[in-house]
Image (cartoon, rainbow, N blue to C red):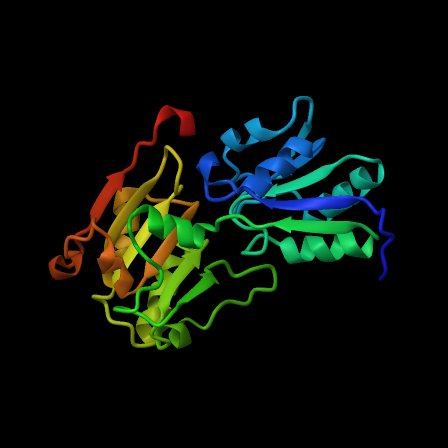
Amino acid sequence: MSRPVNAPTVHLVGAGPGDPELLTVKAVKALRQATLALVDDLVNPGVLKYLRRGARIVHVGKRGGCASTPQAFIERLMVAEARRGERVVRLKGGDPFVFGRGGEECDALRAAGLQVEVISGLTAGMAAPAAIGVPVTDRRHTRGVIFVTGHTGEAGGEPDWPALARCGLTLVVYMGVARLPHIVQGLRAGGLAAHTPAAVVCSAHTAQQRHALCTLGSLQETVLREGLASPAIVVVGDVVQASPHWAAPGLAGAASAVEQVRLPAKHR
């Protein structure tokens, strides 16, 4: 579908994993120009300080297991407000195109004759492990990394965990804490050893950040014992050993290293 060159443009902006200082310069520029921002639940409130004075903010939360704003409503609202002349920003945690429904929203906006500009953000799958010193790729440990969702999705499908266990790559799991027993069982069934290093990072790059380093075999027990919860990223693979927090928990069975990170007040 062709769009007139003067068609309104909606910006899909990645807000990054938490810390407002991890925004891109281009994201800040888009926020300063917006008159309307549709904001996801996982966006740090500190990010909103970059919006221009008087900009309207509409919170359109989408969290697994919680009451969520229907996707169709969000898409209709963006189209209607852009046609009314609002400079619309859709502000998403992380990156719009990494488990953020950015592709769906682009399709809906373009089908309505609007233009779309996507401004990438730092996704939690890279930023959360980095926050505890875990490189998702490291030639000493792995040939690559796989980003995968632990959520079954609306259609009920899910990743082939046994196949992922055999790939030899770092596994970075989004939205997986609630289904850890099933995920661990699938990875173990695929041949991944119980002593494989693992890590969980909750609320990365915020004042509430906590993490645990353990093994695949003790992962579920560690998460339950320490009360770790979503939003969280789970990392499985030898790269976890690169973290300065790693203290050989694999040699101690279910032992783990757990720490809460306190950020400066300006980031809270």
Q: Quadrant of the N terminus?
A: bottom right
Foreground residue among 73 and 245? 245
Residue found 64% across the figure and 31% down from its top: 32
Foreground residue among 104 and 17? 17
| Looking at the image, residue 86 lies above or below residue 243 | above
Q: Residue 22 appears at what percent x and percent y?
A: 46, 40
Q: How many marks?
A: 0
Residue found 58% across the figure and 52% down from its top: 100
Residue closest to the far top: 53
Residue found 58% across the figure and 41% down from its top: 27
Q: Residue 131 appears at what percent x and percent y?
A: 33, 46
**Corner quadrant of residue 170:** bottom left
Q: Residue 132 appears at what percent x and percent y?
A: 29, 47
**Corner quadrant of residue 146:** bottom left
| Looking at the image, residue 102 lies above or below residue 37 | below
In the drawing, does residue 78 fall left or right of residue 98?
Answer: right
